[in-house]
Image: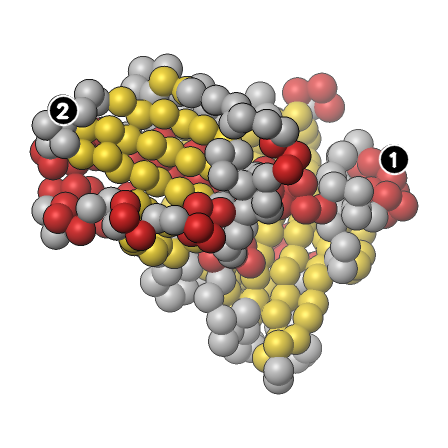
Amino acid sequence: MKKLLPVFFLLSAFFSCDLKTVEGDKSLLPKSSGKFGEVLIVVDTLYENRQTGEALDKIFNQALVGLPQQESQFRVSTVPPKAFQSILKRGRNILKLSIGSNKKTAINIEDDVWAKDQLLIQITAGSDTDAARILDKNAETIRNYFNEKEIERLQKQFAGKTQKKLMKEFSDKHKVNIKIPPGFVKMAQTDSSFWIRKEKSIGEHQILQGISVFYEPYTTKKAFDRKYMADKRNSFTAINIQGTRDSSHMQIYADYKPDTLAINLQGNYAMEYRGLWNMKNDFMGGPFLQYTLVDEKNNRVVHLDGFVYAPKFNKREYLR
């Protein structure tokens, strides 16, 4: 089993968090700009093709696992310090590097510096080698910081727009508190499961996002095994998520072994699975993301699952 990775973490070993306030009222700041998954890197062009550039490439252009086509974890733009002015300072996610022989090694994390809902990570280093070392050592943490900020933004975006009636129905029946964004509709419900779907079209192309919750009594520690997860998911989807053709239903794509990661999900030990699904006897398919955790209060194993169908589009942000 892989190392336990907290989803919400504290940076104490390598980071000194400097949450400075700007002069004046932060409510007067403009709204941050950019799309989900975008990161602006501010670095001298001198270092783009050196060790620093290689380290940055490993952080941001690493392929995200569990997608049918290769997509990087972020969409990155790079700008030199002299050009980092005006509207560029309103970027939602910014990594700013300052490298020089008179610089002390440091990493600072700041919110809302030039715009609302902005995350700025600043790194100073004495040399190209030092900057690359800092980036390599903290690659996963930097990625997680930007990813968690994006999730926080999504939560804020849907706050107050949730479907309270449907949420109450699921809470009363299943003892599951889930925030349901606009556009999702109930597709099926049993005594131990439910799933909802959101559908839209861009031109002639269909896009589906599905969320499932299903659970059973906690009777074995094998609940976190990959095979156990696959069997349970396939059993659920065979009955509940069926295609338009006769005998067609969703299943895990057998030729791709789901990637696993142990995480801390809101204080609960959970296993994350990223993999691919396809429709048996049909031609649909796409990525899924599932979390399995133990609900000790109700002595049950709960599976939280999301899937995406967007055959003509990149899927990273739909999966997020």
Which residue type carries mark 1? Asp
Nearest to N terminus: mark 1 or mark 2: 2
Helix, strand or loop at mark 2: loop
Q: Is residue 231 left or right of residue 206?
A: left
- Label 2 environment density (alpha carbons within 10 Å; few <14, some 14–19, many ≥20): few
Name the residue carrying label 1. Answer: 172
Is residue 29 placed above or below 48 in the rendered structure?
above
Identified at 71% across, 19% down, the residue is: 297
Which residue type carries mark 2? Asn
Identified at 42% across, 59% down, the residue is: 67
Identified at 42% across, 20% down, the residue is: 18
Determine which quarter of the picture holds residue 94.
top left
- Residue 127 bears which disc, if any? none
Q: 218 or 34, which is in the foreground?
A: 34
Q: Is residue 24 left or right of residue 177?
A: left
Is residue 130 placed above or below 244 in the rendered structure?
above
Q: Residue furthest bottom?
A: 204
Identified at 38% across, 49% down, the residue is: 85
Name the residue carrying label 2. Answer: 102
Is residue 140 placed above or below 21 in the rendered structure?
below
- Label 1 environment density (alpha carbons within 10 Å; few <14, some 14–19, many ≥20): few
Helix, strand or loop at mark 1: helix
Residue 190: x and y, percent? 80, 48
Q: Are marks 1 and 2 in contact (CB under 8 Å)?
A: no
Residue 211: x and y, percent? 66, 52
Which of the two marks, 1 or 2, is nearer to us in this view? Answer: 2
Residue 141 visible from this viewpoint: yes
Distance Cα–Cα, label 1 vs label 2? 61 Å
